[in-house]
Image (spheres, rainbow, N blue to C red):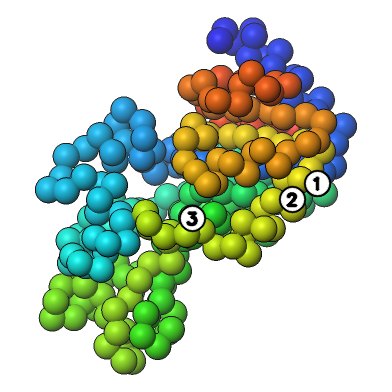
């Protein structure tokens, strides 16, 4: 898309934001790539890198249980990313919420950047790397504890300092179900929204992507570099970097 065309689309997006105050944002990995967090499914993403095991297998519940040491070696190397900051998209979404325009952010990301930018109502469909818990006694641990190998037990993975139980990141692995309370709240927000903005997601991950089916509102906006399955149904499609698009938006 040319800059001229992009400007036209962004102006239309601005008008939608100006005219509505019940907006919901549904986002994926593309929202965080501009903060330096790799996209799992891009050409350079995790799924196209080489490991002893495929990433899909490593990030499964079965692998976590059977080979926790290998799981945490990968997890620490690829999913615990420090020093990243919210980008223009995260910040503008927080501003829209504060201004009473945006009701909720529903995200497939696990990096906590929406909260870091100031968003309050964030529904994390796939959990967060910032939260971890002991599977034996329930004690909570932060990301720094899990990232530090000195907190590993003799088997080579992090253990609880209180009871010695294994510590699991509060992220949804393959073979695990999504949190039903989070799903239900997401359905309610999307069902009641006047505007749904889909950003930075290929809409390839289910059941999360299926939440879009509940939208019955006025305007569906898709902001994504690559085509998605919802483009044909959208009122506005902007094939541009999401940070660039949101950076151009004014919050009144």
Q: Quadrant of the C terminus?
A: top right
Can you tell which quarter of the image residue 14 is in?
Answer: top right
Gap between marks 2 and 3 measured at Cα: 17 Å
Apparent side of residue 46 relative to residue 14 in the rendered image (left or right): left
Secondary structure under the numbered disc 1 in the rendered image: helix
Q: Position of residue 62 (x, y in %)?
A: 27, 62
- Residue at 82% x, 31% y is 218
Mark with earlier residue (3, 1): 3
Q: In this rendering, is residue 67 above or below 108?
A: below
Q: In this rendering, is residue 126 above or below 132?
A: above
Gap between marks 2 and 1 measured at Cα: 5 Å
Badge 3 crowding class, 10 Å Cα cut-off, few under 14, some 14 to 19, many 20 or more, is many
Residue on which disc 2 sits: 189
Whether the residues at callouts 2 and 3 have beta carbons within 8 Å, the answer is no
Q: Position of residue 200 (x, y in %)?
A: 53, 34
Residue on which disc 1 sits: 192
- Residue at 47% x, 59% y is 177
Badge 2 crowding class, 10 Å Cα cut-off, few under 14, some 14 to 19, many 20 or more, is many
Q: In this rendering, is residue 172 above or below 88?
A: below
Secondary structure under the numbered disc 3 in the rendered image: loop
Whether the residues at callouts 3 and 1 have beta carbons within 8 Å, the answer is no
* The one of 212 and 148 positioned closer to us in this rendering: 212
What numbered label is drawn on residue 250?
A: none
- Residue at 31% x, 92% y is 163
Quick one: which residue is furthest to the bottom in this view?
Answer: 162
Residue on which disc 3 sits: 126
Apparent side of residue 81 relative to residue 17 in the rendered image (left or right): left
Can you tell which quarter of the image residue 141 is in?
Answer: bottom left
Badge 1 crowding class, 10 Å Cα cut-off, few under 14, some 14 to 19, many 20 or more, is some
Apparent side of residue 69 relative to residue 173 in the rendered image (left or right): left
Whether the residues at callouts 2 and 1 have beta carbons within 8 Å, the answer is yes
Q: Quadrant of the N terminus?
A: top right
């Amino acid at each position: 898309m040319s800059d001229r065309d992009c400007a036209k689309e962004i102006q239309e997006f601005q008008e939608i934001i100006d005219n509505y105050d019940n907006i919901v944002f549904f986002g994926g990995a593309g929202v965080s790539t501009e903060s330096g967090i790799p996209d799992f499914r891009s050409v350079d993403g995790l799924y196209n890198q080489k490991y002893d095991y495929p990433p899909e297998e490593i990030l499964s519940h079965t692998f976590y249980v059977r080979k926790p040491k290998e799981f945490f070696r990968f997890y620490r190397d690829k999913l615990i990313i420090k020093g990243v900051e919210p980008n223009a998209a995260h910040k503008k979404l927080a501003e829209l919420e504060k201004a009473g325009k945006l009701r909720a952010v529903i995200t497939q990301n696990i990096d906590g950047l929406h909260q870091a930018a100031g968003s309050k109502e964030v529904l994390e469909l796939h959990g967060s790397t910032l939260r971890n818990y002991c599977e034996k006694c329930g004690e909570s641990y932060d990301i720094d504890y899990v990232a530090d190998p000195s907190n590993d037990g003799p088997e080579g993975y992090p253990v609880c300092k209180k009871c010695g139980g294994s510590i699991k990141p509060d992220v949804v692995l393959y073979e695990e179900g999504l949190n039903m309370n989070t799903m239900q709240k997401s359905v309610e927000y999307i069902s009641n929204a006047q505007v749904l903005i889909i950003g930075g997601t290929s809409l390839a991950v289910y059941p999360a992507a299926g939440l879009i089916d509940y939208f019955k509102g006025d305007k569906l906006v898709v902001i994504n570099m690559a085509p998605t399955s919802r483009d044909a149904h959208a009122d506005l499609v902007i094939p541009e970097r999401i940070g660039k698009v949101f950076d151009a938006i004014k919050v009144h």
